Image (cartoon, helix red, strand yellow):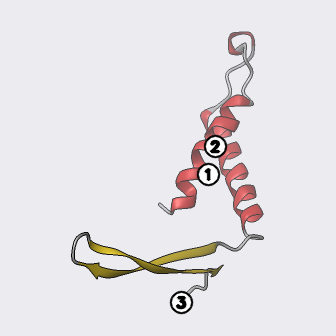
Amino acid sequence: MPFRMLIILPAILVSAVATLPLKAQEQAPIPVTQVVDKIVMQEHAEVELLRQYSPLVETYIQMVRPDKELGAVPDGDRYFSGPRRAG
């Protein structure tokens, strides 16, 4: 399962459950298929919303140099950031 689904699916499940009536005993029970359909529709809407964004990647590289007393010590760093390119 993709990482974003691990984040999105619990949020969708919570929002779907939150839309259910608080007093279920006074209303007719909602069929499970209807709940699942609502979750799937919400998930598709969420995926479409996320398609307008592009992920950013940030990389930090720290250079080290040997030190007789401490071993490896920091000797500079580099930052790289930009949009993720597939492939």
- Extreme left residue here? 68
**Image quadrant assignment for residue 16:** top right
Residue 57 horizontal/vertical position (percent): 59, 75
Vertical side of 71 occupied by 27: above or below = above
Amino acid carrying mark 3 in the image: Gly
Q: Quadrant of residue 70?
A: bottom left
Q: Residues within 10 Å of mark 3 (few under 14, many from 20)?
A: few
User: Residue at point 74% right, 21% down?
Assistant: 21
Q: Earlier in the sequence, mark 1 or mark 3?
A: 1
Residue type (three-letter) at the residue carrying disc 1: Ile
Q: Which residue is mark 1?
A: 8
At horizontal 66% and vertical 45% (from top left) the residue drawn is 39
Question: Where is residue 28, by image quadrant?
Answer: top right
Q: Which residue is mark 2?
A: 11
Residue 76, above or below 55: below
Looking at the rendered structure, the secondary structure element under dot 3 is loop
Which label sits on residue 87? 3
Q: Nearer the viewer, residue 64 or 40?
A: 64
View extreme (front): residue: 69
Question: Picture coordinates of residue 79 (x, y %)?
Answer: 57, 79
Residue type highlighted by circle 2: Ala
Measure the C-alpha gap from mark 2 to mark 3. Answer: 30 Å
SS under mark 2: helix
Q: Name the residue at 47% across, 80% down.
A: 76
Marks 1 and 2 in Cβ contact (< 8 Å) = yes
Taking the image as shown, residue 36 lies to the left or right of residue 60, namely right
Instruction: Tell me where residue 83 appears, x and y as whole percent.
Output: 66, 80
Q: Which comes sooner in the sequence, label 2 or label 3?
A: 2
Is residue 36 visible in this depiction of the protein?
Answer: no
